[in-house]
Image (spheres, helix red, strand yellow):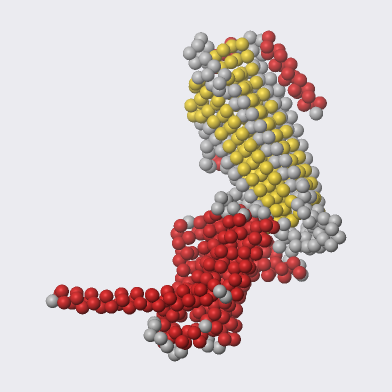
Amino acid sequence: MSLFVRGIKGEEINKTILNYSFNIKCMLKIFKYSFYDLLRSRWLLMYFLFFLATTFALLYLSSDISKGIVSLMNIIIAIIPVISIIFGVMYYYNSREFIDLLLSQPIKRKSVFLGQFLGLSLSLALSFVLGMIIPFAVYGIFTSSEIWNFSSLLFIGVILTLIFVSLAYLISILNDDKIKGFGIAILVWILFSVIYDGALLLFFVSFSDYPLQKFAIVLTVLNPVDLARVMVLLKLDVSALMGYTGAVFNQFFGTTWGMFISSFSLLLWIFIPLFSFLRIIKKKDF
Amino acid sequence: MVKNILFFISIFIFSITAQYASTIFVSPNGKNNSIAKAIQMAQSRDKIVIKPGKYFENAIVIDKPLDIEGELYPILDGNNKEGVFIVKSDSVTIKGLQIQNIGMSQIDDRAGIKFFSVKNCLVENNKLINTCFGIYFARSSDCVIRNNFVQGFATRETETGNAIHLFKCTNFLIENNTVSGHRDGIYFEFVENTKVCGNTSFKQIRYGMHFMFSHENEYSKNKFFNNGAGVAVMYSHHIYMHENEFTDNWSPVSNGLLLKDIKDSKIENNFIDRNTIGLFAEGCLRLEVKHNRFSKNGWALKVLGDCYDNNFTDNNFISNTFEVVTNATVSNNIFEHNYWTEYSGYDLNNDGIGDVPHSPVKLYTYLIERVPESIVLLRSLFIDLLNLAEKVAPVITPESLEDHKPAMKAIK
């Protein structure tokens, strides 16, 4: 009796595994196509050249790698979110017809979209990483003591790319109207990079009579751009952050527990938009 | 100057006369095995040579001019009790000893070597390890402290004294000492006409060097790093500080150089690097701050509103997170011809001086003063926009705090 049940279950499992591997194969194939397609695009080349040129210029002008890293962080925090979100929305709308074609095939919707998502975010991340690594390698990062600061910068850049590409996908699936989609994408970017900080400052100033350190930490962790900035800053601008209240932040972000929470929050910012996107495509009428 | 020369001549003469005096040897296994007894036996101007070995003696009183010299650093162990030497006579020389393990007391200031009301003494080439106070002078004049190594292992302020402690002294020379792990590295209270040169002071719990009510002193070519604060100069005037290095003084309340109620002093050619606050000034008058290099500090300068008529000229401000912070809306200090890495002006006539004045105070530094939590917004895009708006039309930052002649290139 028990054997029989096990047999049926085994068959089911085998089937799901087969299905699964088929889905993954499809996804990888779509990923490969969109990745190679994007690598040939002029936009991505520009993105790569932009990082290459600014990194070279900053390293050349500052002649000090740690100073170069601070300036680059400013650029990364400002540029990566906006480019990722705009380019993501643009790519989705442009490849809309191709998506419709793929969806008419016997492939899972998940594989189509995930494949494209991976292709886009990885090609953006690749051109960012290459654009940074080449100049730093020329200026000798691998023998410098700044290698850890540099790799945390790379890590933050890649995470920000993933977060904003997944936000871009969510925005564009929710809006079939191109103009509306672009508008919302820009608004989301401004919200995270400027308005949130303004509101935070207003909050700090109006409640400055109260102990705010813990709130400040919580509110920082909630915004991926702020969190990414603070994580890099704690490695670079320690002397300033050590002062006064800064010590509290260092105590939080400096510990493994704090690092775990902040990395977890960053990962949530990738997966929440991505999962809600995947839920929507299940039901959406294309 | 004449006083100094006379002082050195006198030391020279003493050293010649010492040749004719007799020499007493002390060794652990010899006839004389007690330093205290040898000192009792000795005549004035005798020389006492201490052979290598370990001696457990406390509170040895030196009450006549003697030369005490160690061979190959004999160890004088205080056994965690009282201090080793108490000197009450002029013209005593102590050289080449290793003094260690003096117990902490809350009642008296115990020290490795303690001097009371003396003149023309010399402390040279000694090692003092884990002595509560290292070298302690009170009410003395014309002495030299040179090439000593004073090491402590304190973790709290109350556990220890100061490595080199001077109280009511004049005309000292303190040079090439290495001090670490105490409350203050070098401590001055009511000390005048003293030179401090070429010392290294690190890992002090409070200050690398500390001046209280000590006027007309000069310190130069010293290195202060990893201290609670590099150097604190308080309630003094006419201090000449030059060619010192203040580096890596990092902690929530740390300064490279802390000035409180200082008048008519000069701060020149110092190297102030990687401190939380490079130079902190409160209640200072008529300071000349010239040719210093402030680099990679959190705040390069923090000048409070009660500072007047100070000149900051020809300094280099390189890669500091914040250049100047103040709590006043009017500035009564002059900033001229400094080099600022944050300067974004131009120089049309190519004379090396920027055509647009540079205001080193930013709106954000004010915000941090008011709401310390806003430090989380450091280097945020929003803050950059805010600073830009304030720069275009200053409302809060003092317009008078400006460098009208900013240098375009770093000043050599």
Against B251, is A274 above or below? Answer: below
Against B308, is B211 above or below? Answer: above
Residue appearing at x 68%, y 38% in the figure:
B222
Residue extending farthest bottom: A285
Q: Position of residue B94 (x, y in %)?
A: 62, 22
Residue appearing at x 55%, y 61% in the figure:
A153
Against A196, is B85 above or below? Answer: above
Against B268, is A54 above or below? Answer: below
Tell me where residue A14 sits by quadrant: bottom left
Q: Position of residue B237 (x, y in %)?
A: 76, 41
Please give left or right for residue A200 compared with residue A100 in the image. Answer: right
Tell me where residue B203 sits by quadrant: top right
Q: Position of residue B340 (x, y in %)?
A: 74, 56
- In the foreground, B265 or B62: B265
Please give left or right for residue B247 compared with residue A99 in the image. Answer: right
Residue extending farthest left: A1
Residue appearing at x 57%, y 51% in the figure:
A144
Tell me where residue B49 sits by quadrant: top right
Camera sees residue A242:
no
Residue appearing at x 62%, y 26% in the figure:
B125
- In the foreground, B88 or B279: B279
Please give left or right for residue A106 compared with residue B66 in the image. Answer: left
Quadrant showing the N terminus of chain B:
top right
Camera sees residue A98:
yes
